[in-house]
Image (spheres, helix red, strand yellow):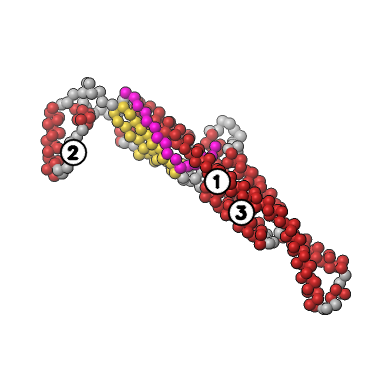
């Protein structure tokens, strides 16, 4: 399955301990780069989340943000009046310098009066893994939708390349025939310019043999059958990759390891570009030069799209 590296996913987990929200953003990158933006109280959840994401994502710059809110047992909560007086004194002192200092909220006062205990590592780690799993599924669904759009664009370019190769192949006999006619005319003009009776000095068989020899050399120079065959092969391989049929033979490997579509496409476009360059260097007519340029433009368009493929 073709997947883009640009997407967003989010999910929330809720228990009696509170709520935890995970947001995952990813953009294109040559390698996997995980960046966690976690509150200090949730630093213990980073290792399991890193392991989870590393198993499912192979490339991209990924940013993971987490926010949490603890549930307050208000029916059992109490306010320490001595603590409240200390808070009031501190607030008054602060407002002498910073008049706009806001008063603390009730839940903050309740947490302070009841000890503000640390988070239960096991419970909050489980919540983080649950939220991250669902956010990751949301992210992957978005990456697949965008990947399908990118695949459709590249498939259109591949169809354009197929049409160009067919046109070049169909034009080759015409190019050879035109060259043979031009060569025959040049030989005749050269003989007449050298001697008005030049045709008396050479037989028709000798002239035909000379034309055939020059035409044969020209046909060898512009022979692009191998290049066209390789381009067709590369286009077929591109279709396999875009359709997701180019998979690893060993089913035990994780799906993400089997795909590697982005890197496979990058290598494939290098090979396509090499064939297009060779086609241009062998151009025996302006139409072939234009075809080589059009091929390179289509390859570059596909390469740009593939930069965002995982």
Task: Quarter of the image for the N terminus: give it.
Answer: top right
Image coords of residue 230 (percent x, y): 67, 49
SS at badge 1: helix
Look at the image and tell me whether residue 34 can be seen: no
The image quadrant of residue 206 is bottom right
Q: CA distance from mark 3 to mark 1?
A: 15 Å
Which residue is tagged 2?
Answer: 102
- The picture places residue 242, in percent across and down from the top left corner, at 58, 41
The magenta span reads: 1-16
Mark 2 to mark 3: distance in Å? 65 Å
**Residue lying at 17% horizontally and 41% vertically, measured from the top left:** 101
- Check disc 3 and report the residue beneath it: 295
Q: Does residue 175 appear left or right of residue 153 in this picture? A: right
**Residue 139 percent location from the top left of the image:** 45, 36
Residue 122 located within the stretch drawn in magenta: no
- Is 14 above or below relative to 57? above
Q: Is residue 6 magenta?
A: yes
Which residue sits at x=52%, y=50%? Answer: 304
Q: Position of residue 90 (x, y in %)?
A: 14, 37
Q: Which of marks 3 and 2 precedes in the sequence? A: 2
Callout 2 touching callout 3 (CB < 8 Å): no
Q: Name the residue nearer the viewer: 164 or 91.
A: 164
In the image, residue 110 above or below residue 278: above
| Residue at the spot of label 1 | 153
Q: Tell me if 82 is positioned left or right of 163 in this view.
A: left
Give the image quarter of residue 201.
bottom right
Q: Residue at x 61, y 34 (%)?
A: 249
| Mark with earlier residue (3, 1) | 1
């Amino acid at each position: 399955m073709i997947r883009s590296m640009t997407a967003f996913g989010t999910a929330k987990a809720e228990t009696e301990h509170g709520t935890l929200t995970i947001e995952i953003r990813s953009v294109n990158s040559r390698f996997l780069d995980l960046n966690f933006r976690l509150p200090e109280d949730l630093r213990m959840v980073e290792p399991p989340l890193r392991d989870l994401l590393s198993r499912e994502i192979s490339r991209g710059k990924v940013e993971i943000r987490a926010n949490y809110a603890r549930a307050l047992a208000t029916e059992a909560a109490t306010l320490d009046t001595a603590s409240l007086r200390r808070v009031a004194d501190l607030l008054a002192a602060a407002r002498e310098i910073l008049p706009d200092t806001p008063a603390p909220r009730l839940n903050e006062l309740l947490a302070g009066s009841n000890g503000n205990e640390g988070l239960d590592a096991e419970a909050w780690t489980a919540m983080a893994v649950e939220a991250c799993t669902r956010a990751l599924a949301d992210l992957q669904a978005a990456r697949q939708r965008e990947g399908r759009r990118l695949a459709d664009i590249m498939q259109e370019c591949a169809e354009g390349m197929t049409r160009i190769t067919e046109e070049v192949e169909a034009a080759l006999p015409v190019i050879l025939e035109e060259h043979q006619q031009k060569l025959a005319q040049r030989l005749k003009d050269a003989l007449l310019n050298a001697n008005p009776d030049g045709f008396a000095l050479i037989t028709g068989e000798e002239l035909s043999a000379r034309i055939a020899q020059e035409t044969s050399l020209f046909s060898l120079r512009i022979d692009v059958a191998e290049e066209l065959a390789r381009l067709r092969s590369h286009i077929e391989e591109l279709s396999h990759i875009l359709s997701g049929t180019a998979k690893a033979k060993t089913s035990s490997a994780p799906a993400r390891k089997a795909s590697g579509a982005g890197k496979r496409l990058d290598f494939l476009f290098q090979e396509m570009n090499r064939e297009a360059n060779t086609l241009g260097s062998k151009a025996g007519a302006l139409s072939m030069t234009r075809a080589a340029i059009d091929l390179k433009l289509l390859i570059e368009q596909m390469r740009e799209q593939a930069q965002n493929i995982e």
